[in-house]
Structure formats: structure tokens, C-alpha cells
Image (cartoon, coloured by chain):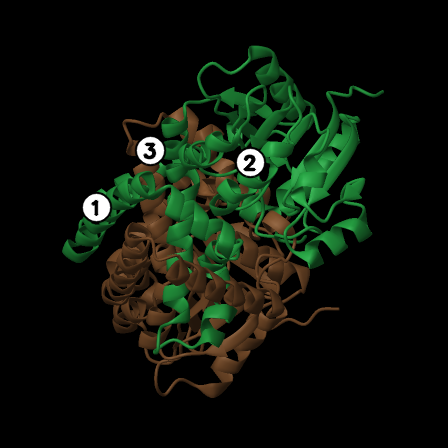
Chain colours: A brown, B green
């Protein structure tokens, strides 16, 4: 049963998200043809070999030619130059979207390069893993995850609906959000947690009095959870922080304030404060499990047996 | 094939660790009889119903009578009073051990109550999940995880070896460590990460400008990983922090210092610093996977499909 939504889809940047989109679109027959482009020759070669999309081109301009939907799947810091490159080659009536983790900066970077008659609709699927590169995608990545669509004012409603339907047909739930609010929400649910995880792993790596072997061997006591997030793609994350400065720094400021309060409770032996705090945080996890956003199996189900 | 190591084992405190020990001992036939005690009547009732151990007693004194091995599986803050209670009832030649996440404070709390002729051998299995209570245990919890034994000076070598063999037969790898070093290593690999996770979850819960529904729905972007750890038992963790103050505060101080350096890199737009840092932290995860301490499957394998 084909439920084709776009005739030709072009994926610019061929990593985890593009690869997963290609597989999710094929799973449901959502596009007649999928083209692709990546800056790195090696990535293009691997993508062609594994058939990530139907045709891999050597330039972004060729890849977007005649495409009804163009998806920018590059790090946030590369959006402006890619948009400048493809702008002149976009088909009238086409939709241009992206999957970047930051929205205000992407809107500012891409908008100037969008020709009249092209619908630019920023979006952000809240899904991913610590793996990156053209072979890391899988069709189920977006199942039951949210995709936030962040339309700029005056965007054609039909074009938005079509993109929304694509994400739903790829397994996602869709919500609309304003760009600045998106960036604040993601600073809480994604950007600050990533920076904190990177920091904790860096500290452990750097302690003279505890060996790396000890850190590695005894990581199952909690630390290893942080290392998964801290193994995420360095370029992608550098660009996220550089392009969502204000919101990330605001949340980190709140985090530090709260951490200091808990440190003081430890120092002064205020067990009630600690116990109350640790009891309150339990309920958020229950909410996440009830909302279908995580597994309730102990230890994420990674323990065998 | 029975490979009995102790005739009678008494478990004091009947939560995740005690329940998992009982199942792991049964799996390999390591004890002829397992007795148990918990302070809460409800816990004792549930433990008796599910057959967590062979016999559940209403007092700790009865549970440890004639036991060859007594395992304290209570929160660190309860160790002193439990040790005082059972001390007079311990059999000569018996081994008394514990599973507490802190070792110096437990040694100080328990040692005064250990009668002559009883071998007190502190230990700490580095295994657990976010679940707690008598029904949360499972036989595989210790498989391929480390158990650190922290002997006090002058302890009988045969008694240490016997306890070591028990842990190995329950699936664990065993190492010996000095108490203060244990507490520092665990501050890095467990205590600081838990406090940081609790803090991040508390901050998210407390932001006026982002709703709880948003935090819950959009948690798959990273945040949800923190909520697992932050759903751990509040009493256990309160006691850990109150009893490993110095090492935890030292590591948190290092963490804050490093976090400030990264915040400054974000503020000043120092992308190279961020990229270098994020690249370095990747290698620790590789080490953890090679050491068999975590799964290499994307997203801890929790994505279906």
C-alpha cells in the first residue's frame, strides 16, 4: 500500500537522521524517489554502497534538482552555507525543511537563501542515538517520538500539513512550537543534559587519583549512563551549543544554583532536604514512562536474563 | 551440581540487592538455607509471599542466629543500629559483610559492634537498577559486574577468600580496595553522577517557563537518561551522600570547575575547545564497552525494531 506524500525527496547530509528518514519513508512508501548528498566523499561512497537513498549526487545542487521536499540534515553550523548553495536550484513550490536541534539560529541562517515560491518549514525530530554516520540509521528511530514543527509566520498551511503528514507516516507524533520556546524547551530536555554528561565524563577522565581503568571497570554504578550521551557526535553538539547559547547558559545557571543548594545540604547534613528532593524527582520518570517516552524495564532493559 | 559455600546465610534488609543475592545463590546452589529480616512489616510479608528467602523472621536477632554469613543490605545510615542489634547474636566464626555504597563510614559504624571471633569483611557489589523493594531482585544482577571487597587490617585470609568465592559464584568479578580509595572511586563513578542527575531532573521539574508535559513529552532528546538514575531509592541515596561527604564534594567541585570552563567556551564561542572536549569523552565509552560494562547497541538497546 503506497501512501506517497512527496514524489522526490532530497536529503542533504547523510548521517543518522537522514538514513533513518530514508528507511522510514521506504517502510511506508512515502516517496517515489530519494536523492542524497553529503559533503564528505567517503560518506557519499558508503551511502551509495548501502543504498541509503536511490541516488547519491556529488553536489547538493544536483541532489535538490526537481525535489518536492528538501531536508537539511547537516550540523546546525553548516545550515547557512548549504542553504546558500542549494537556494538557486530549488524547484518552485518545493518545501525546504531541516532537522536541526536549534531553531532560531537555523531560521536566521536559512531564511535569506530561500527563493520566493519555496516553503521553508523548520522542524526537529526529537530522536537520535549516540551513533552517527551513514550506516547508523534505522526505520524505527522516529516511532512514538515527537517531531516539533516550527513554522515561520505566513507559511502555506497546505505545505505545513503535508510535512506534518510525512512525519506522522514515519512513525512520529507532531506538535507545533514557536522558535524561541523550542530552543528553551530543548535546552532543558537535551542541550543542558548533554553538556552535563560531557562534563562529568571529562572530569572522570581527568582525575589524577582515580585511574582510567577504575573509571571504566566500575562504571556500572551510574557513570556509564552518562557516557552514552557523551559519545554523541562532537561536531553536531559543538554547533548546538554555539547556536543556542542564551537558553543553554540560562538552564546551566539554574542547574548550578540547584547543585550548590544540594551540595550545601550534603555539607551541613540536611538529610530531609536531600530525601525530599530525591522523592520529587521520581515522579517525572513515572510521567515519562506513562507518556511512552521510555521503557519501564529496569536499567533500560540492557541487563540480560 | 551443588557448590555450597555457606551453610546458612542471613540477609538483613530485603530490597533489590538482597533479593538478587538470594536468587543468585539459589541459581548456583551456594547456600543450604537463606534467612531474612526487614524492618518494615510489609516488606517482610511480601518477601515471605514471594519466597525471597527460605524463612523471614520478625527480628534481626532471630534471622542471624546460627548464620555462617550475615549480609547487611540496609541503607548506609542504618548500618550502625542494625549492627548493634545483631552483634550479640552472631555465631563465633561467622562472617559479617555488607553491600553499602560507602565503605569508610560503614566500617566506622559497624566495627564497634563486631564481637571477637566474627570476621567483618566490608564489600560493595557495583550493580543495581532504579528499582527498589523486595520484588525488584533478579539472579543476573551481578553477572559480569564488579564486587569490591574492602578488608580491614588483620582479617582472616580464609574468610576473605570464602566471601570472594561467593561473589564470583554469584556471577561477579572481585577486586580488593582500600576504604578511602573506594569512596573516592565511587564518588566519581556513582555518587557525583547520581547527584547531578537528581539535580538536572529537579531543575526541569521546577522551571516556570517550560511545562511538565513538555519536559515529559520531549525527554527522548537526552533528558530521560537522567530520570532513570534520579528514580533511585531516596533513602539509600540520602545516606550515601551524608556518609561520603568529602569525596562527593571534592568531585562535585571539580565538576563545577569544568562545567564553568565549558560554559565560558559557549559564551565566547570557542568551538575548538568544545569539539576537542567532546571528542575526548568518546574514548571512555569505547573503553567501557570493551570492558564488558555496557552494551554497544544504540540507545542501550531500548529502541524496538
Query: In which chain is the residue bearing label 2?
Result: B
Residue lying farthest to the top in this orientation: B157
Chain designation of label 1: B
**Rendered residue at 71%/31% (across/down):** B9
The disc, 2 or 1, on the residue closer to the chain's N-terminal end is 2
Task: Name the residue: 55% across, 36% down.
Answer: B99
User: Can you identify the residue that label 3 sits on?
Assistant: A205
Give the residue pinned by disc 1: B257
Q: Residue furthest front?
A: B88
Mark 3 vs mark 2: tell me if same chain.
Answer: no
Q: Which residue is mark 2?
A: B99
Q: Residues within 10 Å of mark 3 (few under 14, many from 20)?
A: many
Q: Is residue B56 left or right of residue B234?
A: right
**SS assignment at label 2:** loop
Q: Position of residue B272 (x, y in %)?
A: 21, 43
Residue B122 at what x, y percent from top left? Answer: 52, 28
For disc 2, the neighbor class at 10 Å (few under 14, some 14 to 19, many from 20) is: many
Kindly report the distance in space between the C-alpha atoms of the residues bearing marks 2 and 1: 32 Å
- Relative to B33, is B220 on the left or the right? left
Q: Is residue B294 above or below residue A153?
A: above
Q: Secondary structure at mark 3?
A: helix
- Name the quadrant containing residue B223: bottom left
**A193 to B61, vertically: above or below:** below
Does residue A265 sit above or below A8 in this rendering? above
In the rendered image, the quadrant that contains the N terminus of chain A is bottom right
Specify whether residue A100 is in view.
no
Q: Residue furthest right?
A: B1
To which chain does the residue with label 3 belong?
A
Residue occupying the point 73% across, 20% down: B5
The quarter of the image holding the C terminus of chain A is top right
Amino acid at each position: 500500500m503506497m501512501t506517497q506524500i512527496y514524489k522526490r525527496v532530497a536529503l542533504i547530509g547523510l548521517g543518522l537522521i537522514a538514513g533513518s528518514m530514508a528507511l522510514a519513508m521506504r517502510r511506508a512508501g512515502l516517496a517515489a524517489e530519494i536523492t542524497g548528498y553529503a559533503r564528505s566523499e567517503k560518506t557519499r561512497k558508503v551511502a551509495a554502497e548501502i543504498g541509503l537513498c536511490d541516488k547519491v549526487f556529488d553536489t547538493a545542487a544536483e541532489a535538490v534538482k526537481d525535489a518536492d521536499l528538501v531536508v537539511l540534515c547537516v550540523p546546525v553550523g553548516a545550515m547557512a552555507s548549504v542553504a546558500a548553495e542549494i537556494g538557486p536550484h530549488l524547484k518552485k513550490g518545493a518545501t525546504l525543511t531541516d532537522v536541526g536541534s536549534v531553531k532560531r539560529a537555523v531560521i536566521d541562517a536559512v531564511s535569506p537563501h530561500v527563493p520566493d515560491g519555496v516553503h521553508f518549514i523548520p522542524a526537529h525530530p526529537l530522536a537520535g542515538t549516540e551513533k552517527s554516520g551513514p550506516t547508523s540509521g534505522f526505520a524505527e528511530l522516529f516511532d512514538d517520538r515527537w517531531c516539533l514543527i516550527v513554522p515561520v509566520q505566513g507559511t502555506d498551511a497546505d505545505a505545513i500539513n503535508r510535512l506534518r503528514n510525512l512525519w506522522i507516516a514515519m512513525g512520529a507524533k507532531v506538535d507545533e512550537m514557536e522558535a524561541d520556546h523550542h530552543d528553551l524547551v530543548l535546552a532543558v530536555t537535551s542541550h543542558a543534559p548533554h553538556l552535563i554528561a560531557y562534563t562529568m565524563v571529562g572530569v572522570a577522565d581527568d582525575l589524577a587519583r582515580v585511574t582510567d581503568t577504575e573509571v571504566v571497570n566500575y562504571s556500572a554504578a551510574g557513570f556509564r549512563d552518562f557516557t552514552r550521551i557523551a559519545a554523541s557526535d562532537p561536531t553536531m553538539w559543538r554547533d548546538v551549543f554555539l547556536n543556542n547559547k542564551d537558553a543553554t547558559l540560562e538552564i546551566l545557571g539554574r542547574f548550578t544554583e540547584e547543585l550548590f543548594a544540594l551540595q550545601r545540604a550534603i555539607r551541613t547534613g540536611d538529610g530531609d532536604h536531600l530525601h525530599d528532593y530525591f522523592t520529587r524527582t521520581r515522579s517525572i520518570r513515572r510521567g515519562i514512562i506513562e507518556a511512552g517516552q521510555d521503557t519501564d524495564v529496569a536499567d533500560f532493559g540492557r541487563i540480560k536474563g
